[in-house]
Amino acid sequence: MKKIETLGTAAVVAAAVAFPAASYCCTSLIATPGASADGSAMVTYAADSHTLYGELYHTPAARHEAGAMRTVTDWDSGRMLGQIPQPEVTYSTIGNMNEHGLVIAESTWGGRHELAGSGMIDYGSLIYITLERARTAREAIDVMTGLVRDYGYASEGESFSIADPSEAWVMEMIGKGKDDPGAVWVARRVPDGYISGHANHSRIHTFPLDEPTTLYSPDVIDFARKQGYFSGKDSDFDFSRAYAITDAGALRGCDARVWSYFRRFTPKGEMDKYVSWIMDGKGEVMPLWVKPDRKLSADDLKWMMRDHFEGTHLDMTADIGAGPFTVPYRWRPMEFEVDGTTYTHERAIATQQTGFSFVASTAANRHDAMKGILWFGVDDANTCVYVPVFCSAVAVPLPLAHDTADLLTLSWDSMFWVNNYVANQAYNRYSQMIPDIRRVQSELESAMLEAVDKAAGDVAGMSTDAAASNLTALTDTLTTRATREYKALGDFLFVKFLDGNIKRQNPDGSFARTPEGTPVQPEFGGYNEAYFRTIAESPDGERLKVRKIEQ
């Protein structure tokens, strides 16, 4: 999604003028089958936007008569871009996964504003049309590049994560400007056993020109020469340097999120050498992939999507912006100026304005109906509950449906709104509320894992259609349960933390009462030591001192 909300540059401002929809910013992380605990390929995605309602998309499989057309609608603005012919058969899709376990995610990096695409296929349509037409990652790359070749590309610089049960790829693409509707692109297969990721900055730098694990458009280097972006030897060509804008926003605001992922799963200190890259753009460029020191689970990636740089020099719970309740969130705008000097808040993977996020796991050794599992959540990934959605799904649960609510219409039947009810209370008193949220969140997600393990046994002997029906019903049950229990959690937080107090509880979790039935005197949570010290050391400290009064 669009990167306009990250740290600013002239190029990004120009992109904002060309694409005035909403401000977007996304993160996608990858683990190859050899890097995962269960042998699955895994891809994550956070669709971050200040105007995106969190819902689950579904398109059923279909056969099309000759001459049938598909409308192409810009995903950001809803504007109709045109129509293209339908193939004879299209596949069922659920979210960013299709019935074959193919997964596609993205992040927008904008790039050189004069290259904004002028064709028909925007990045969102490119994803969802491809999911309808491709079965594998390599087929997806062929479909995606064929679509922009035949109909033109309509978006900015984009990174795509593309995975099937066998392999995972990163593909990057940018348009060729108003006079040419086409695009230039490069795709690299992530070596098995490695992890990768992208977060609103182009991550492909130099690449081999003659290996089957790297694919690229025939003119990717020649076009850069023609535009004056590159003048060296072909072997020295750097896609990111040529087509993207490498500034503080791209590195500290974007690459830093991938750095935090790599750091979490590599030996201690291994990623320290890239700190100068993400902070100052100096030193060794951060690699496109690294080898983790252990195999990752879907749970590992769920918690990675909840990252706020905890334990690093960028830890958002530890700087002055965290306030007395160690809140790892910062309201926009991210940049601000004081006495002529520009400062910034950090931009972590987890952020308040997420519409939806997921951790997709796709594996060949599972029943076809659950070959792909989309652990799907709405609103802030840090406080959401990830529910299992299966690649064979034939319907969307009511709490995740398109017509249940929208961003301007609150509904307690909507998982997005219920999760916001919980999260937005925690943003005010995070350190005090997050233990209660983690308790309910962990209980629900543990129950989800148990339900999926049981379902694998239950559907083992079923046909794909029967299993699909079973699994769709399971998703509906689990989603409804999570929505109901999170509404109860929100009510509980509201009562427990009313008026800055903390109501006392009995061992069973109920609120404590006196023998006469009245509420027990609450705790006064107050503020932390760092906050009090800040007051004492401030210009107001002297005024706020308690003075001894002589009798």
Image (cartoon, rainbow, N blue to C red):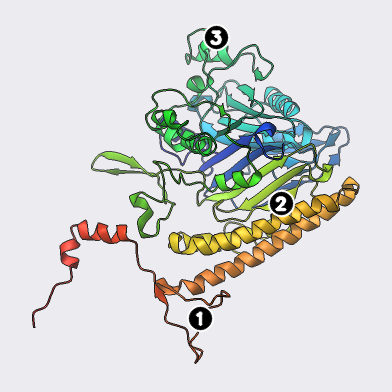
Residue pictured at 48% horizontal, 87% vertical:
514
Residue, far top: 233
Nearer the camera: disc 2 or disc 3:
2
Kind of residue at badge 1: Ala
Residue pictured at 62% horizontal, 57% vertical:
406
- Residue 122 at x, y percent in the picture: 63, 34
**Nearer to us in this view, 94 or 451:** 451
**Nearer to us in this view, 413 or 97:** 97
The residue singled out by tag 3 in the image is 234
Residue 417, compared with residue 37, is above or below; it is below
Where residue 180 sits, quadrant-wise, is: top right
Kind of residue at badge 2: Pro
Kind of residue at badge 3: Asp
Residue pictured at 36% horizontal, 51% vertical:
321
**Nearer to us in this view, 514 or 507:** 507
Q: Earlier in the sequence, mark 3 or mark 1?
A: 3
Q: Earlier in the sequence, mark 2 or mark 3?
A: 3
The residue singled out by tag 1 in the image is 512
Spatial CA distance of label 3 from label 1 is 72 Å
Residue 511, compared with residue 122, is above or below; it is below
Which element type, helix, strand or loop, lies under badge 1?
A: loop
The residue singled out by tag 2 in the image is 388
